[in-house]
Amino acid sequence: MNAKAEAKDSRFDSLKWLVVVALVVVGVVGNQYFSAEPLLYRVLALLVLAGIAAFVALQTGKGKSFFVLAKEARAEIRKVVWPSRQETTQTTMIVVAVVLVMALVLWGLDSLLGWLVSLIVG
C-alpha cells in the first residue's frame, strides 16, 4: 500500500462511522416520511445530509485514505493519452465489421449443423 495512503485510525473513527450511518438512515427515513413534501425540498435536504455525512466520513482514517486515493487517481487520469476522434471512429468500425463477420460465420455454422442434424434424424 502507498505510504501516503496509510492513515492512522483514531479512537473515534467507529463513532464517526456510526454518525455517517445515522445520517444516511435519517435521510432515507426522512425522505419516506416527508413524501408528501415537494421533491425539491427533499432533494435539497438529502444533498445537505450527504454533504455532512461525506464531511464526517473524510475525517476518519479510511476517509482520508480514500481522499488521497481519489486525488492520485485523478492525477493518473490526466496522464492518459486519449485517442483522437478519427482513431475512435476507425476502431469502432473495425469492431462493427468483426462482429458482423462473426455473426455471419456463426449463422452459417448453425445452418449447416441444423441441416446435418435434420438429415441424420430424418
Image (cartoon, grey):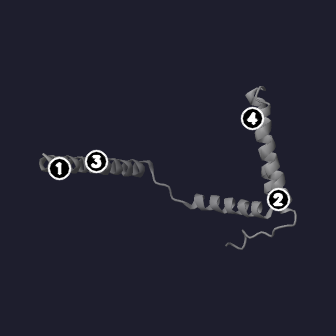
Q: Circle 3 is placed at which residue position?
A: 103
Report, in whole angstroms, how far the alpha carbon at label 1 lies from the one at label 2. 68 Å
Which of discs 1 and 3 lies nearer the camera? The answer is 1
Is label 2 in contact with label 3 (beta carbons under 8 Å)?
no
The answer to which of marks 1 and 2 sits earlier in the sequence is: 2
Three-letter amino acid code at disc 1?
A: Val
Which type of secondary structure does the marked residue at label 1 adopt?
Answer: helix
Three-letter amino acid code at disc 4?
A: Val
Q: Circle 4 is placed at which residue position?
A: 43
Taking the spot 77% from the left edge, 62% from the top edge, the residue there is 64
Report, in whole angstroms, how far the alpha carbon at label 4 lies from the one at label 2. 24 Å
The answer to which of marks 3 and 4 sits earlier in the sequence is: 4
10 Å neighbourhood of mark 4: few (<14), some, or many (≥20)? Answer: few
Taking the spot 78% from the left edge, 39% from the top edge, the residue there is 29
| Lateral position of residue 81 relative to residue 37, left or right | left
Q: Circle 1 is placed at which residue position?
A: 117
The answer to which of marks 1 and 3 sits earlier in the sequence is: 3
Choose between 112 and 41: the one closer to the eye. 112
The answer to which of marks 2 and 3 sits earlier in the sequence is: 2
Report, in whole angstroms, how far the alpha carbon at label 2 lies from the one at label 3. 54 Å
* Residue 60 x, y percent position in the rendering: 81, 61
Which quadrant of the rendered structure holds the N terminus?
bottom right
10 Å neighbourhood of mark 1: few (<14), some, or many (≥20)? Answer: few
Q: Circle 2 is placed at which residue position?
A: 59
Choose between 53 and 118: the one closer to the eye. 118
Report, in whole angstroms, how far the alpha carbon at label 3 lies from the one at label 4. 47 Å
Which of discs 4 and 1 lies nearer the camera? The answer is 1
Report, in whole angstroms, how far the alpha carbon at label 1 lies from the one at label 3. 21 Å
